[in-house]
Each structure stands twice: as C-alpha cells, then as structure tokens.
Image (cartoon, helix red, strand yellow):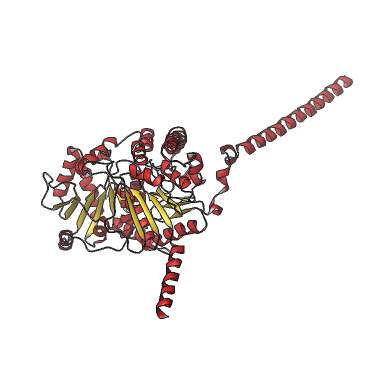
Amino acid sequence: MIKQFSSLILLFCTLICAINSAHILGIYPLPGHSHYRLGSSLFRELAERGHDVTVISPFSEKDVPKNGTYRDIVLDGLFVGDEKHKGKQWNMFKREGLNPFVGTYVVATMASKFIKMSLNHTKVQKLLHSDEKFDVVITDNFLSDAFKAFATHFDAPLIVLNPVGPNFWINPLVGNPSPPSYIPDILLNYYHPMTFSERMVNTLIYGFNFLLYNWLVYPQHNEYVKQFIPRGGELKDILYNTSLVLLNSHPSLNQPVPLVPNMIEIGGFHMKPPKKLPEDLQEFLDISKEGVVYFSMGSNLQSILWPIEKREVFLKTFAKLKMKVLWKWEDDELPGKPPNVKISKWVPQMDVLAHPNLKLFITHGGFVSSVETAYHGKPMLAIPIYGDQRNNANFAYKSGFGRYITFSNLTEKNLLEAINEMLDNPKYSENAKIRSKIFHDRQVHPMDTAVFWVEYVIRHRGAPHLRVAALDLPWYKYLLVDVIVVLTLVLGSLIFITCFILKKVWKKICTKKNTKKVKTN
C-alpha cells in the first residue's frame, strides 16, 4: 500500500513538472562568443529551473545543467580554423575609423554569409524537418533576422534577446519610439544634448538605416527563409510579430529612453558572484598590493591583431608603470614584454574585475565589458574600434567613471597620461562605485526578471496584449501625415477665405470713400 502511494506521489510530481516544463529553442548562430555568453546564461538558467532547452550555436556547453534537459545542436564544421585564423577573418582593427554610413552598411551585411551557411547546416535542416514541437523560440537579435522564422515554422511565440539597449535593430519591429532629436544611433559617438550638425547626421543615419534594412537586409534574409525554412512564411510578418524583447541594458549604463510594454531591461542578468581565480592569477593579483591594470580587447578584437606600431605603444607605456599589468594575449609569447606584465590567453574577466587589487580596466568598450565594469565599480579606459564601442566609451566619459582614446590618437604620451590621470584622480573610482550602486539597486535580480518574462510569454501564448497599436499603422498614420495635411488644408483654406473676405470688405470701404469724395466735389 505504501509502495503504491509512493508511486502515485512520484507520478503526480512528474506530471506537475511536465506541466510546468516548457520546450524552449534557443538560437545563437554567429561565432561571436561574447553574444553567446549572454544567451547561454539565460538558457542554462531556464534549464536549471526545469525547462527542456535546445540550443543552436557554434559552441557547446561542457558542464550542462542538471535539473532540466539541455541539448546542444553544435554548428560544427562552419567556422573551422584555429583562433588566430578566425581572428584574421574578423580583424576589426582594419575597419576602424570608417565613415558612419559605410560602418552602418558593413555591420548590417557582415554576417550574411554565416547566416546562410548556418541555415543550410545538416543539423539545422534535420531539426527543421523533424516533428519536434517548441513552446517558445529565443534568438539573438544581432544580424540573424532569418532565424526568427523558426518561431513561425514551429508555431511558437518569438522572444529576441538584444545584446545592447534599444536601437534601430529592434525599435521599429515593436513600435518603440526613438526620436533622432535626442536618441543617437548606436554606432555614433554622440551624447545628449546633440549639436545641430550631430542631429542632422543622426537623422540621416536613421533614414539610411530604414532604407538599408527594408531594401537590402530584410529582403535578403527573406530569401533565406524561403530557401531553407519550410514553414517560415514571410519575414516582414515575422519581424513585426515579436512577443518579447529582452534588453541587455539598464539606466546605470544607458541614457534613459522610452520602452513599450513588451521591452524588458535585464542588463547584467549574466553576472554571478565572483569565484576563486586560477592559482597563477590569484597569486598575481593577491601579491600586487600597489594595484593591477587589466587589459583586454574582448573575444572578437584580439590583442595579437594589433598593428605592431600600436602594440609597441602599449609595451612602452606599461613598462613605465609602477604597478603590474595583466594582459589578455592570445599567444604563448609576447615579444618585448616588460617584467611587470603578465600575459594570459584566457582570463575569467568577471572574477578578475571583482578582485580588490584591480584598479583600472583598459578595454575596447564593448557593451558586455561595460556591464561587467559597472557591476564591479571599476574605472574604465576605453579604446573603441567599431560598432557601439564609441557610444559606450562616450557614456562612461560623460558619466565620470571612464575615459577613452581613439585609435588614431593612441600614442605613448596619450596612453600614459590617461592611465596616470585615472589612477591618481579619485573621482573616477568614486564615480564608478556610484554607478555600481545604481546598477545593483533593483527589486529583483535581472535573471529572475528574464526568466519570469520568458515564462509569462509561454503562459499567455505570446502575450499579444503587450503589443502596441503603432505596429498596425502605416507610416503616414503613425506620423499623423494625413492629419497634418488635412489641418494644413483647412487652416490654409480659412486663411484664404478670411483674406478674400477682408479684401472684399476693404474694397467696398475704399469704394464708398471714393464715392463720398466725388459727391462732395
């Protein structure tokens, strides 16, 4: 009897878990590890909370979650070659200083080849032609619009994870207002309030983006959908049917901007309490009582690809510092390395930034690095190269917890002056701590917010009640062009009629005066 009762309890618990467990498909098709880290953090957490998670990406998880089900569909064979070879293909140092319009075009089209290869991958096609079902599809929102058609194919709600704050890549798709009068484009190094010339360039970039994406990017991705996704439908219908946008942003890191109800900020959701460092790094930081400068250009911008003359700038500058330097260097040897510099191919960045002896972070200014800097309250010296890095660097500068040096102005003199200024002036450290305090001051942890809203969309089958009416309006209605035209015509007509009547009245008055004069004479 007891055994039967135990079996019933076990069956009941299993049924409850099955009811609460959702089948989730995560898609991160590009070989950008920093973006994948964001998606992976969310997918792992969803699996830990009992969900059945499948992830398509070029990467695989070594330590898979234990509670739910976690399955990798690894896009092997697409991005072959060692890290050096891959780095040369993505060497953004060569694209630094591009005209903003050229830069916008490059960013919009740079991943087209990878998207097509990923969609045509044997494992992806096998999944698309299987009878699997999913309750929700979650995709990266960076240059991978064709993959959003998986939501239509599997008849599931679509959630996109934006790696940064709201911008042109996502605002039009959910009807989020973004006036160019005070919201600078993510690829521009502008900050509110903008000058007239900046607002002019910003407005032109907005228009250029509209034409670029609607005439080139989206039609190209639509062809991929038709070619590779059996029940993908039309991309324009898919793009404007996004159920939820998770934004990797927060007021401590971004200028405050409007957000529609289905845009949720979860900036810093991937952050976790610091862990013990590898023994060599732990010892290096522990014994450096005078402090340590940490230098890393992230995962895509690799230090080994610095032009030799710029690399020499760092070597000569670091040699003049009294404190030690930890340099993320993707090779076994660094020619000319000063004795106070330690190199490491891989650095657990979040844990290094948490160490009390870490005094300054020299970075490319990528948004993930900016988030981690703010989380730990460390001053940031940015050397932005491409994308949103200049925007992030300018925000840190305007907020008083960072400085930046452009690539063209990177000289030994400028670098040494900036480092010494930031180490000697306490305002940078103090402002970084203030920024960290704002970052941490939240009702709940951002990961809990992210999981809640994913489950909310699943519970409410896409949560269509969060969709704003702006998406159903043609542009001329949204901008009130028809109303303005009618009001202009009415006002113009009233002015014309009024002028006509006044002219007639004045003519009559003048005629009477002339008649009186004639009679008098």
Image location of residue 141, percent across then percent down = 41, 46
Does residue 498 lie above or below 79 as drawn?
above
* Left or right relative to 4: residue 474: right
Position of residue 128 measured from the top left corner of the image (x, y, whole percent) = 41, 45
- The one of 354 and 72 positioned closer to us in this rendering: 72
Q: Quadrant of the C terminus?
A: top right
Choose between 65 and 35: the one closer to the eye: 65
> Is residue 399 something one can see in this rendering?
no
In the picture shown, does residue 365 fall above or below 196? below
On screen, residue 504 above or below 422: above
Against 401, residue 202 (above or below) is above
Task: Identify the residue at image location x=58%, y=37%.
Answer: 476
Residue 455: image location, x then y, percent: 46, 59
Q: Nearer the viewer, residue 61 or 100?
A: 61
Residue 321 appearing in the image? yes
Quadrant location, the N terminus: bottom left
Residue 206 drawn at (x, y percent): 46, 37
In this image, 388 relative to 472: left or right?
left
**In which image quadrant can residue 444 be found?**
bottom left
